[in-house]
Image (cartoon, grey):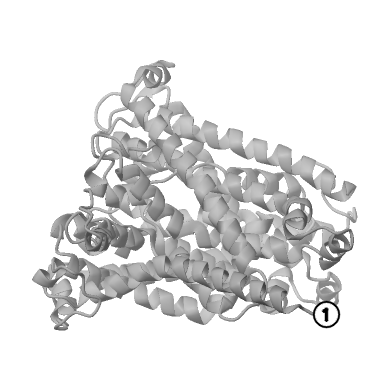
Amino acid sequence: MKATPDFRARKALSAAGVYAALTAISLVMLVPFLWMLSTSFKEPQAIFTYPPQLFPSTFKWENYVDVFSLIPFERFYFNSVYISLVVVVGTVFFASLAGYAFAKIPFWGRNVVFLVLLSAMMIPHEVTAIPMFLFMRDLNWIDTHLPLILLPIFGAGGVFGIFVMRQFFITVPTELEEAAMIDGCNRFRIYWQIMLPIAKPGMATLTIFTFVTVWNEFFDPLIFINTRELMTLPLGLSLFTDEVGTSWHYLMSATVMATVPLLLVFFMAQKRFIEGVAMTGLKE
Amino acid sequence: MKKSGKKRRGGPLAREAQLTGWLFISPMVLGFTLLLLFPMGKALYMSFMDWPLLGEHSFVGLENYRNIATDEVFWKVFGNTFYFTAGLVPFNIVLALMLALLLSKSMKGIGFFRTAIFVPVMTSLIVWSIVWKYMFATDSGLINQLLLMFNIEGPAWLYNEKLAMPAVIITSVLKNVGLNMVLFIAALQQVPRSLYEAAMLDGAGKTKSFFNVTLPMITPTVFLTVVMTVIGSLKVFGQIYVMTQGGPSNSTKVLVYYIWEKAFKLFQMGYASALAFVLFFVVLVLTLLQWQLRKRWVFNESDT
């Protein structure tokens, strides 16, 4: 196709418009992060200075140190990391085991059980949270990490995991299993040594999904945890917000520390993550 | 039950399949029964009881539900939840669709724009809400400071009955618009190129081929996304908790916040359970509607 000069000019103009619009929305998304970073280094009085400074006149690194004396930040961090890791490992293991069975093993009642599991995914978490609170209180598990670990693995998050893994295993040809069975492999070995290695992309998607969900979970920690030292990052940060009021420099130092590692992980796994969202989101 | 197994053989292999099948799903099924199914039943039971945290529980029948119907705060909360949803969903969907249309073709810098718009999705909701609480702060917030550059005295966004909810809505749209954008981009890339070529041969311009090719082809995804976004909006909690605590004067108190307050601050467990069932019922209706309509669309798709 040959473009006339007029057509080309119009095209360049509309491209400029597109870039302007995209730059504007990207700025709206990124400026809060820059602002957060900038404030985290500011002196308290610099926060209220007008006009606003993106680059603080003096960098006060001590804000970051002070956060640790105001709140047990390292405990929040540790709790978030270890709870997320345990939940990810548990979910991927149990969900892939069940997902494999639902996809590949013909057992009685398979379809009915799967349907019941799927339909339970629409139960709002808030409905079961109240009886769950009483249940955990009877077990003396309030103010422990057990509810924060067990509920996501075996609750809606786990069911979602079964669904993702089953979709994945269905695409694996049956011949592979049959050959292994003739060689005398039992089912668990087939699952562990043949299926899991094939399912790595599915497991990666589920891992990222579960990690982000658990890392950001707020409602459960809020109702089950009371002691500061046992809090996770989101809960600890929300408590800190109540406590420091308008000491934004402290608050922003804490949020920078809470955000940056996760964003680094995201940049490394970005492609897979976005593909995973598109895949699972569409099939849900 | 349609097919419980393709090959019906009574041999040892079939028996082995029964055993291992159930063995492999048993941890999940057990956990699911204890942590989801059983609490669901108990919540329903509790919604018919007067259930303080300490002290006697007593059966009250439908009284909790009757009290909800006459609870003024509930209707306020219900209206707020509706306001939040009605404000967020169209804003979110239209913006996501526009961004997806701009970012589905290859162009320079596409990776940067997609990433920038997706980064908030990856950020913790609590962190995002804290940062935006700061953005909206009356004296030190960036928004009011920028307004001051134009000689406009910014309002106390989060302490104003009329402005608090829009502020929370904007915060929430920016947080999640990237997610819907990614879903729409994936759907747009599924539309066969041949359809556009055919439309072009028929003399359809850009606008025409958008309305006659693109939109019909991605309608199922758009609809699915709308329903998911609506359900998500009905359950909004974290940003309200951080930014406004339901205030000022209940103007941002939404359903889940009210449930949380009744259950875990005032310990009216029975009443809170009944409130939770109102939420469940709304979500249920929406989900069934989605299934119904999806069936029809799948039929239509194979039709054309």
Q: Where is residue A35 in the image (x, y as percent from the top left)?
A: 28, 71
Q: Which residue corresponds to the image point at 72% horizontal and 39% vertical from the top-left?
A: B293
Q: Would you say B70 lies left or right of A72 here?
A: right
Q: Position of residue A31 (x, y in %)?
A: 35, 70
Disc 1 marks a residue whose amino acid type is Asp
In this view, A201 is above or below B59: below
In this view, B162 is above or below B134: above
Q: SS for tag 1? A: loop
Label 1: how many Cα within 10 Å (few below 14, some 14–19, many 20+): few
In this view, B188 is above or below A35: above
Q: Nearer the viewer, residue A239 or A160?
A: A239
Which residue, as the protein is rendered here, is positioned at the far front?
Answer: A6
Q: Position of residue A244 (x, y in %)?
A: 14, 60
Q: Nearer the viewer, residue A101 or B80?
A: B80
Q: Would you say A100 lies left or right of B58 here?
A: right
Q: In which quarter of the image is the C terminus of chain A?
A: bottom right
Chain ID, mark 1: A
Residue B288 location, quadrant: top right
Q: Which residue corresponds to the image point at 41% horizontal and 31% vertical from the top-left?
A: B78
In this view, B89 is above or below A182: above
Q: Would you say B21 lies left or right of B277 here?
A: right
Q: Which residue corresponds to the image point at 14% horizontal and 83% vertical from the top-left?
A: A58
Q: Which of A261 and B33 is in front in this view?
A: A261
Q: Would you say B155 lies left or right of B28 here?
A: left
Residue A181 visible from this viewpoint: yes
Residue B84 location, quadrant: top left
Residue A189 location, quadrant: bottom right
The residue at which mark 1 appears reads as A183
Q: Which residue corresponds to the image point at 27% horizontal and 38% vertical from the top-left?
A: B161
